Amino acid sequence: MKKPIIPREKIQSLKAALASPTRAREMLIPNFIEAASTTVFLVGKNVPLRDTRMFSLLLAYCLSAGKTLPPFTGGTPTSTLYGSGEPDSVADLSELHFVFQRDVHQSSRYRAEENLQLLDLYADTENPVTLNTVRGRAELNALLGGMSALVIHDLPKWMSQGDRQADDGLELHQWLAQLNDRGIAVIVFEPESSTQLIADKVLKATAVIRLVHDAAAPTEVGGGFNIIRNKMDREDPLPSTVQFWYKVFDGRMEFGYQYRDPKDPHTAKQVQIIERQIEVARLAKQGMPQKDIAEILEVDAATISRDLVAFNARATRAAEDEAVSDFASRRKAHRGSDDSKESG
């Protein structure tokens, strides 16, 4: 049997390989979202749609403003088009308002106002923008002029009934790859199912991030889930599993993250305590005496006093952490600007 002939251009020596320059990945959000690539958030069956919608809006806002999305550091402000599958656009605007109000920095608010565009799937009920028809793709192509990122929430809502392949001969993942070739990062939220549209089509293992039910996430005043990802490289300092949570109370939104074992049964009890502390703070702000709060929540007055102290301390730490993180991001961006001026 003859040995197969391997063209010389397909192989190289170790010396040549080591001498070849390595190209660092360009990231919109370091260790999380890659530029000019497709990232799929694969949503588990027990993860509420409202939770992924809040997260997708928060992600789009942070991309457009160049803000930190803890525990991931902030990147460069990015022109972003956000598309929601939510029929009630008022719901999106209401939650986006919470995100905007939480941002205490005028400069990043301004960047988000300039860079973030909102696409309403149901604005034209007779001719909605669909991702598996030539007409829908042409319309979206036009809308993406000058954009660097596209965030699509609840992908199945953006598909017309019928075959997933449009009459231009391209399957959805192939068309999205064309957007990547234009320098556009595509971030898609797709429900986990037996008929996934693109999650099983992407080639990079780091391009699929799973959102999985978190039994310890808040339920009464917010939500959350486990974020499970493959590390970008050996220098990626963050754990593969992170717990994202958010809370909306008294007209304000808070969000954060934890590193813990998702199966830890003690965490659910901790979340119950935190939710009680939030309710205590809400009632106290309304002017209700601690004694009355204790009666309503069926705990002793000393517990109410401890809850208020714990809540205020946590709020102070969260504000300090965000200020430090935003300062670090601005300092990094400023250094990058100085480097560009020097190189120019």
Image (cartoon, helix red, strand yellow):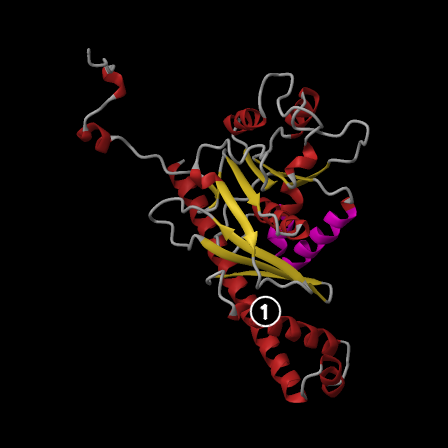
The magenta region covers 90-111
Task: Give the number of callouts.
Answer: 1
Image position of 140 with respect to 226: above or below: above
Q: Nearer the viewer, residue 91 or 271?
A: 271
Q: Is the magenta stretch mostly helix, strand or loop?
A: helix
The residue tagged 1 is 271
Q: Looking at the picture, how far across and down is residue 114, in whole percent?
A: 65, 42
Image position of 289 with respect to 81: above or below: below
Q: Residue 247's image quarter?
A: bottom right
**Label 1 Cα crowd, 10 Å radius (few <14 / some 14-19 / many 20+):** some
Asked whether, in this view, residue 304 is left or right of residue 260, the answer is right
Q: Is residue 96 magenta?
A: yes
Q: Does the magenta stretch include residue 188?
A: no
Q: Looking at the picture, how far across and down is residue 17, in whole percent?
A: 23, 30
Q: Looking at the picture, how far across and down is residue 249, in whole percent?
A: 70, 65
Q: Quadrant of the N terminus?
A: top left
- The outermost residue toward the top is 2
Q: Which of 143 and 256 is in front in this view?
A: 256
Q: Which of 110 and 73 is in front in this view?
A: 73
Asked whether, in this view, residue 182 is left or right of residue 339, the answer is right
| Three-letter residue code for mark 1 | Val
Asked whether, in this view, residue 231 is left or right of residue 216, the answer is left
Q: Looking at the picture, how far across and down is residue 9, in whole percent?
A: 26, 17
Q: Quadrant of the C terminus?
A: top left
Q: Nearer the viewer, residue 86 or 179?
A: 86
Report if residue 314 is visible in the image.
Answer: yes
